[in-house]
Image (cartoon, grey):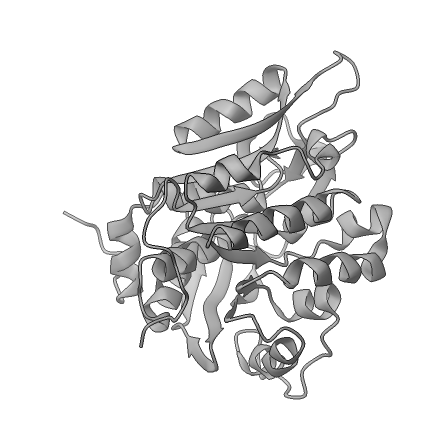
């Protein structure tokens, strides 16, 4: 069965995302209060998809974001180039003292019964200052863009970022691009300037333009105001509760063609059951369930979205597209950092039921 999305066959870019670029400090399994060293990963919920689709899946991708002209900005820009992602930057000058800044995320990995801990420093963040009019969408989309993506993390940064997403989506639609949005509801971010009520107002305006929606039950309830499911899930990887909410989503937003999410049951910081499900034009599709040994869980959801988008962009039918997303998300949790180190061959092999036996 074809996926029924009307993906334009050509364009200078296969995929464009709009969002904040951040750097993540990762002390591994050591809590920050005892850490003596950290690795630095470049990340951003929206950017991660562009990076994954370029590096693993070989697509032509780009990111529209803020960039500050100081050493941290240079570090981030270098990593963006290394992943093969074309940048469209709104540039900011740093004053040498207080910013504007590229946001920092602090996230240890936890271990066993100790969960990972995540917190932010987004003070005077350049990306939060982005607003409508900062990008020449006519020129960007005029060259041809097949798929446009943004997400709830960027929408939550300020009173202007949601309006910028809407502006970009309107331009994307006019240019014939498929539009996706990952709800990625982050209560800490929304609570700073508007809370749940404001989040729903902003996200409702965004979702009016969306073809493909990514988000779990909590995202749908808190971000979209969809009532909780009537059907109780028997476990966290039972798709019943998620699928039970889809009718309400589609009733409010009948233009949405795809709703998808990962399903994860956490046994410990390093052991998860992992699955995925998607509703595509009235039919639901579920991946297998696998047991994951987790190295670094951050970015697994973006890894799923990337693989799903790749399948839909390249004309796969829904079932293999969901499997590609599930497989890539699973693979991504075996690498350090937020973006992929997998190859497409590895992803396809796992999606088809491959094993972890050594490849000779």
Give the x, y percent position of residue 161: 71, 43
Give the x, y percent position of residue 267: 55, 65
Give the vertical position of 246 relative to 178 (above or below): below
Q: Is residue 178 left or right of residue 218?
A: left
Residue for point 48% across, 50% down = 175
Picture quadrant where residue 292 is located: bottom left
Residue for point 31% across, 63% down = 315
Give the x, y percent position of residue 72: 61, 20
Is there any visible trace of residue 43 in the rendered image?
Answer: no
Is there any visible trace of residue 358 in the rendered image?
Answer: yes
Give the x, y percent position of residue 287: 40, 72
Give the vertical position of 238 relative to 299 (above or below): below
Number of marks present in the image shown: 0
Give the vertical position of 76 relative to 227 (above or below): above
Depth check: 154 or 219 in front? 154
Furthest-bottom residue in this view: 231
Depth check: 92 or 334 in front? 92
Q: Is residue 191 left or right of residue 288?
A: right
Furthest-left residue in this view: 360
Furthest-top residue in this view: 96
Residue for point 58% across, 57% down = 182
Quadrant (top left/top right/bottom left/bottom right) for the N terminus: bottom left
Residue for point 41% across, 66% down = 5
């Amino acid at each position: 069965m074809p996926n029924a999305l009307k993906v334009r066959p050509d364009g200078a870019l296969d995929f464009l995302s709009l969002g904040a670029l951040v750097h993540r400090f990762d002390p591994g399994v050591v809590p920050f209060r005892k850490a003596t060293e950290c690795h630095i990963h470049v990340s951003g919920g929206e950017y991660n998809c562009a990076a994954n689709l370029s590096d693993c899946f070989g697509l032509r991708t780009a990111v529209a974001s803020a960039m500050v002209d100081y050493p941290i900005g240079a570090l981030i820009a270098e990593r963006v180039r290394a992943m093969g992602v074309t940048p469209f930057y709104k540039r900011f000058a740093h004053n040498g003292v207080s910013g504007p800044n590229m946001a920092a995320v602090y996230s240890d990995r936890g271990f066993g019964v100790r969960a990972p801990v995540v917190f932010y420093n987004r003070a005077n963040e350049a990306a939060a200052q982005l607003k409508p009019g900062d990008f020449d969408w006519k020129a960007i989309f005029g060259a041809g863009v097949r798929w446009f993506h943004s997400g709830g993390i960027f929408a939550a940064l300020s009173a202007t970022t949601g309006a910028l997403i809407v502006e970009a989506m309107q331009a994307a639609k006019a240019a014939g691009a498929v539009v996706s949005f990952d709800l990625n509801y982050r209560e800490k971010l929304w609570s700073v300037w508007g809370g749940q009520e404001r989040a729903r107002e902003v996200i409702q305006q965004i979702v009016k333009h969306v073809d493909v929606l990514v988000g779990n039950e909590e995202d749908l309830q808190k971000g979209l105001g969809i009532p909780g499911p009537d059907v109780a899930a028997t476990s966290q990887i039972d798709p019943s509760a998620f699928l039970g909410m889809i009718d309400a989503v589609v009733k409010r937003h009948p233009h949405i063609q795809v709703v998808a999410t990962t399903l994860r049951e956490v046994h410990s910081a390093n052991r998860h059951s992992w699955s995925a499900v998607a509703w595509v034009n009235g039919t639901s599709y579920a991946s297998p369930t696998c047991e994951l040994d987790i190295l670094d869980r951050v970015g697994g959801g973006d890894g799923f979205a990337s693989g799903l988008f790749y399948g839909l962009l390249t004309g796969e039918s829904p079932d293999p597209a969901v499997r590609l997303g599930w497989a890539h998300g699973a693979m991504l949790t075996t690498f350090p950092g937020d973006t992929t180190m997998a190859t497409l061959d590895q992803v396809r092999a796992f999606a088809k039921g491959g094993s972890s036996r050594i490849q000779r």
